[in-house]
């Protein structure tokens, strides 16, 4: 099946059955979203949603967060992954938002990436969710699902390469939604270790399903590209 046909069927399914996807992170404004996305790196949205209410009660604005030290932030996020680094990032993020951006979350990827703890993926999430810009954030779910479905080239072994492949075929107006479609499909159906191929509505055009037909729940992970757990901007290929 040609790649363009896979994209057509992917978009057709989700625009019909899941037309208005939303992030599962809880937030009420751009500041709350960027804090939540920074915390969500290598951590579940469920865990982030649990720690955010108390964190925001203590630091309700960028100014409050910027006036705090990493040591003061740490107790509120100690249950998320990499809390020491994230506490430093959040304190620095609050200061920079206050001192350089007037307490407002910037709307460009370039400006966002200047903030502590904000890489391209986080910046893409913010401009996509808050400002509805055609930005495709590539996390481990997007990376995995786009490869398994056959939407991206096998040689696309970095998040940026996957991002470029995806935006080439997806209409700009649908890119913010497609980001959520890929994430949620990866989170609940096309999971990493034992993909639920038997109940997947995309099996008819899924490249991975075609290659593993007969044993879809035991994927050959020896050659499947994966995002490195320690560095979400790099890719590793498992050989175990």
Image (cartoon, rainbow, N blue to C red):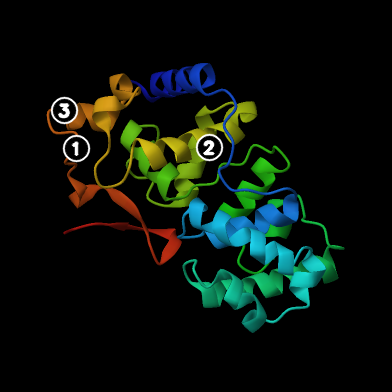
Q: Is residue 2 above or below residue 226?
A: above
Label 1 Cα crowd, 10 Å radius (few <14 / some 14-19 / many 20+)? some
Image mark for residue 180? 2
Is residue 190 visible in the rendered image? The answer is: yes
Q: What SS does tag 2 mark?
A: helix
* Nearer the observer, 15 or 211: 15
Give the quarter of the figure containing the N terminus.
Answer: top left
Image mark for residue 217? 1
Q: What SS does tag 1 mark?
A: loop
Residue 210 coordinates in the image, percent (x, y): 21, 26
* Nearer the observer, 49 or 89: 49
Q: Is residue 124 above or below residue 98?
A: above
Circle count: 3
Residue 107 coordinates in the image, percent (x, y): 76, 50
State which quadrant residue 199 falls in: top left
Residue 159 coordinates in the image, percent (x, y): 46, 50
Could you tell me how far apart the alpha carbons at marks 1 and 3 are, in whole angstroms? 9 Å
* Nearer the observer, 219 or 72: 72
User: Which residue is depicted at the point 47% across and 54% down?
Assistant: 44
User: Which residue is depicted at the point 57% across and 71% down?
Assistant: 86
Which tag is nearer the camera, tag 1 or tag 3? 1
Q: Point out the tag, 1 or 2, that comes first from the N-terminus.
A: 2
What residue would you read off at disc 3? 213
* Nearer the observer, 154 or 200: 200
Could you tell me how far apart the alpha carbons at marks 2 and 3 are, in whole angstroms? 27 Å
Q: Is residue 239 above or below residue 177?
A: below
Q: Point out the tag, 2 or 3, that comes first from the N-terminus.
A: 2
Label 3 Cα crowd, 10 Å radius (few <14 / some 14-19 / many 20+)? few
**Image position of 168 (left or right of 33):** left
Give the quarter of the figure containing the C terminus.
Answer: bottom left
């Amino acid at each position: 099946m040609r790649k363009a046909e896979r994209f057509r069927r992917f978009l057709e399914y989700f625009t019909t059955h899941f037309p208005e996807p939303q992030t599962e992170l809880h937030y009420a404004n751009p500041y709350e979203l960027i804090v939540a996305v920074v915390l969500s790196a290598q951590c579940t949205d469920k865990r982030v949603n649990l720690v955010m209410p108390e964190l925001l009660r203590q630091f309700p604005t960028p100014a409050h967060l910027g006036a705090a030290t990493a040591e003061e932030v740490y107790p509120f996020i100690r249950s998320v992954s990499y809390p020491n680094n994230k506490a430093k990032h959040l304190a620095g993020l609050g200061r920079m938002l206050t001192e350089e951006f007037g307490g407002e979350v910037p709307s460009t990827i370039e400006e966002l990436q200047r903030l502590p703890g904000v890489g391209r993926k986080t910046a893409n999430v913010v401009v996509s969710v808050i400002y509805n810009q055609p930005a495709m954030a590539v996390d481990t779910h997007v990376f995995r699902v786009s490869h398994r479905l056959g939407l991206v080239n096998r040689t696309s072994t970095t998040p940026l390469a996957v991002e470029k492949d995806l935006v080439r075929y997806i209409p700009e107006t649908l890119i913010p939604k497609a980001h959520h479609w890929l994430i949620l499909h990866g989170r609940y159906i096309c999971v990493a270790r034992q993909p639920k191929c038997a109940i997947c509505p995309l099996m008819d055009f899924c490249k991975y399903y075609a290659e593993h037909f007969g044993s879809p729940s035991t994927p050959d992970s020896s050659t499947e590209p994966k995002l490195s757990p320690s560095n979400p901007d790099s890719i590793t290929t498992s050989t175990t």
